Amino acid sequence: MITDDNRFRRVIEQISREPRVAFDLESNGFFRYPERICLIQLFASGRVCLIDPLAIDDMSPLGEVLSSPAVETVLHSGDHDIRSLDRDWGFHVGNLFDTSIAAAFVGSERLGLASTLQDFMGIEIPKEKNIQRSDWSIRPLSDAALTYAAGDVLHLFGLRDKLVERLGALNRLHWVREECDRLAAIRYNPPDPELAVFAVKGSRDLDGHGLSILKALMEYREHHALRLGRPHFRVIPDAALLTLAAEPKSDLRDVRGLGMFARGRLAAGLRDAIKKGMAAEPLQRPRQPRGRRLSRAERAKVGQRLDKLRAWRTEHAKRLSLAVGLLWPMASLQRLASFPDDLETELEAPGIRQWQREEFEESLRRLVDQEFRS
């Protein structure tokens, strides 16, 4: 466990000379708000280093190593890690290999770290939910928590090498490299407070007045989430806010989930938020751009094309023993079903990978030409 800047810099300097480093992190979003990274796990030179970012003033040496194209960063299911690094420190990974992506491209259906290690290496690691969901900002960390954290990086090199060997035999390593590069390019995008109200599950049942009340209630909750340092669901759950937005005259004591916000000054503040929302202009949900309305016959034709495109994707997925979602994006197939003459544009769409074009363009072009343009 590394808790001082001098030792941290020495360790990172050693790692910077290695060809690769296994990486993972733990954060506290289940218990604290705003979420922050609370532990960094690294494996290199035959040892695990657990770094305490809560005790270190300058984390920039880690960012320099991670961004170096000369050091391969091996991680598992790194989407959250990549976003967290960008959010907290602006760190980006210059040479990434994700073993979860690799496992998917050799045909594995079980992509969790414990399952992947068991399937490919016969190794079992502890994955206790109570530790996984623990508050990683609490110090000192227990021995069980440290063992759990170390297990997330200890075997990643061996797993990576086995997967690379299989990918090489299948001639799919460049597919995975492209997917890893796309993952490394992801950045943290903070939620837009003006649009957050529309993302709440159940908000579609509210009218414009209800949405305005919900927005005011969410602003009130955000203030107290920051004050208390708790995630939103531990302050007031969405279900309680939706109840109040739909029935603003409810007795707060009867609304499940309000807890301490149903009494005293907190309750008064909640009522003020409701009044603010009731006085505001009704909110209108942003409308999705709609294309030309299709006749029943045209809709039927689009449906038939989509069925053929889905069958095409399923056939290739079975041939390659891969999940259908990896083969070609469904959104692209839906656009092609509606506008088959736009194939050239669709092949250059942002969601289409180079490896997908190389592997499937000829077959897809043949399908479109023979079935949709005849």
Image (tube, rainbow, N blue to C red):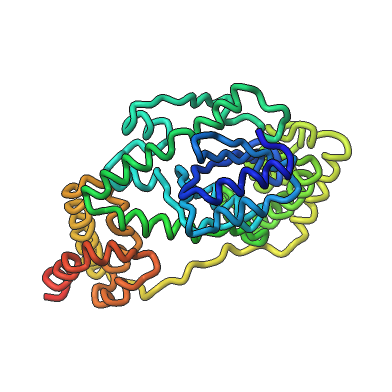
From the top left corner, tell me how far across and down residue 22 is, in percent.
49, 42
Instruction: Report the quarter where the N terminus lies.
Output: top right
In the displayed structure, would residue 227 be above or below residue 253? below
Would residue 116 appear left or right of 307 to someone viewing this image? right
Instruction: Report the quarter where the C terminus lies.
Output: bottom left
From the top left corner, tell me how far across and down residue 199 is, in percent.
57, 53
The residue nearer to you, when weighing 291 against 43, is 43
Residue visible at 37% across and 42% down? Answer: 160
Q: Residue furthest right?
A: 265
The residue nearer to you, when weighing 78 against 342, is 78
Q: Is residue 303 visible?
A: yes
Q: Quadrant of residue 150?
A: top right
The residue nearer to you, when weighing 6 against 3, is 6
In the displayed structure, would residue 39 be above or below residue 68? above
The residue nearer to you, when weighing 326 against 117, is 117
Residue visible at 72% across and 27% down? Answer: 140
Total number of numbered discs in the rendering: 0
From the top left corner, tell me how far across and down residue 267 is, in percent.
82, 39
Q: Quadrant of residue 48?
A: top right
Q: Is residue 239 visible?
A: no
From the top left corner, tell me how far across and down residue 146 is, in percent.
60, 28
Residue visible at 79% across and 40% down? Answer: 228
Residue visible at 74% across and 52% down? Answer: 219
Would residue 89 appear left or right of 288 to someone viewing this image? right
